[in-house]
Amino acid sequence: MGYHDKAHQTGSTLYSEVTDRIIAELEAGTLPWVKPWDDGRAPLGLPRNAGTGRRYSGINVLILWHTLFERGYQSQRWLTYRQAVALGGHVRKGEQGTTVCYADKFTPKNGDDAREPDGDNPRQIAFLKRFTVFNLDQCEGLPDDPTDRIITHNEAVLIPRAEALIAATGADIRIGGSDAYYAPATDHICVPPPEVYFEPINWYRTVLHELGHFSGHPKRLDRLPKTGFGSPDYAREELCAELISAFLCAELGIVPTVRHSDYLGAWLGVLREDSRAIFRAASQASKAADYLLGFLPAPDEGEDGIATEGRIVA
């Protein structure tokens, strides 16, 4: 078996493993990006590498969140076996690692795969590479994690930070009516007044979801579907926006909640048809979350206030 075949087989198996697990969770009525926070044990936030402080992205967020909840870990920090040793510690004997992945490409040196169909350019073949990481709870002898941070659940702190992000995006947000939606044609977001929400934080969850759609406008990340309500592309965009909102909420310290469970059937259809769909949605969601978080002022530069004052999906 050649390298290309092995890489393809490994990637296909990983796609199927992850997708099958997520399908099973959705069939059980649970959302992988919400479930870890239900009992309040798991620390809120996006998973990070303990050695570099960098956030994990894409499908790895869902994979690591799943392990976090399943095993009851109390840290969002992960590292490889070698990183643990390099930091002066070690992984405890008998601990089971978690498989994550990253996408890469290679160029065949010869044979039919070596060139594109036009015969002019070298052909690059995409594949998934697996590697194993361990949670800090599985390690000993490590110094205090310099990248760790405590995320407060105090709304007096969370709401100003969410407001700062929303304002910094420059989004045209119009308050009024009874429905929340993003209108691509006019590039504006409409949300009901905050006072109609029983819990004030839910207004911010709603706006963050609509900002997910906002990020897909052609002049931004150019991700919005060309087809309308009820189509598979529409369901894919709704899944992506749901993930964007979950990633943003987690990073801001806001507990992600189920917003559009009525799309569960459509999401299941998309995932059953294409084992790579959740990988693409998670990848797009990470890119969008990074794009939006890039507007967030530094803690010492925050400003009060929120953008106010315009249908894709809501």
Image: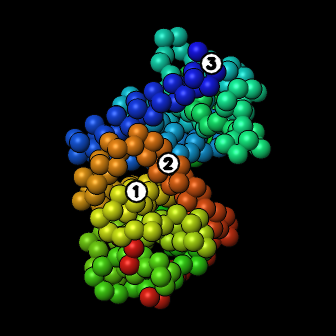
Q: Which residue carries the number 3 mark?
A: 2
On screen, residue 240 above or below 215: above
- Judging depth in this view, the residue of 119 and 277 nearest the camera is 119
* Mark nearer the N terminus (3 vs 1): 3
Quarter of the picture containing the N terminus is: top right
Q: Is residue 74 visible?
A: no
**Neighbours of disc 3 within 10 Å: few (<14), some (14-19), many (20+):** few
Residue 283 x, y percent position in the rendering: 53, 49
Q: What residue type is labelled 3?
A: Gly
Quarter of the picture containing the C terminus is: bottom left
**Neighbours of disc 1 within 10 Å: few (<14), some (14-19), many (20+):** many
Determine the CA span between mark 1 and mark 2. Answer: 9 Å
Write the residue at 29% across / 74% down.
197
* Mark nearer the N terminus (1 vs 2): 1
Q: Which residue carries the number 2 mark?
A: 280
Write the residue at 64% across / 63% down.
294
* Mark nearer the N terminus (2 vs 3): 3
Q: Do the residues labelled 1 and 2 touch (CB within 8 Å)?
A: yes
Q: Can residue 216 be seen in this view?
A: yes
Q: Left of 141 or right of it: where is 203? A: left
Q: What residue type is labelled 2?
A: Arg
Q: Which residue carries the number 1 mark?
A: 236
Determine the CA span between mark 2 and mark 3. Answer: 26 Å
- Judging depth in this view, the residue of 217 and 65 nearest the camera is 217
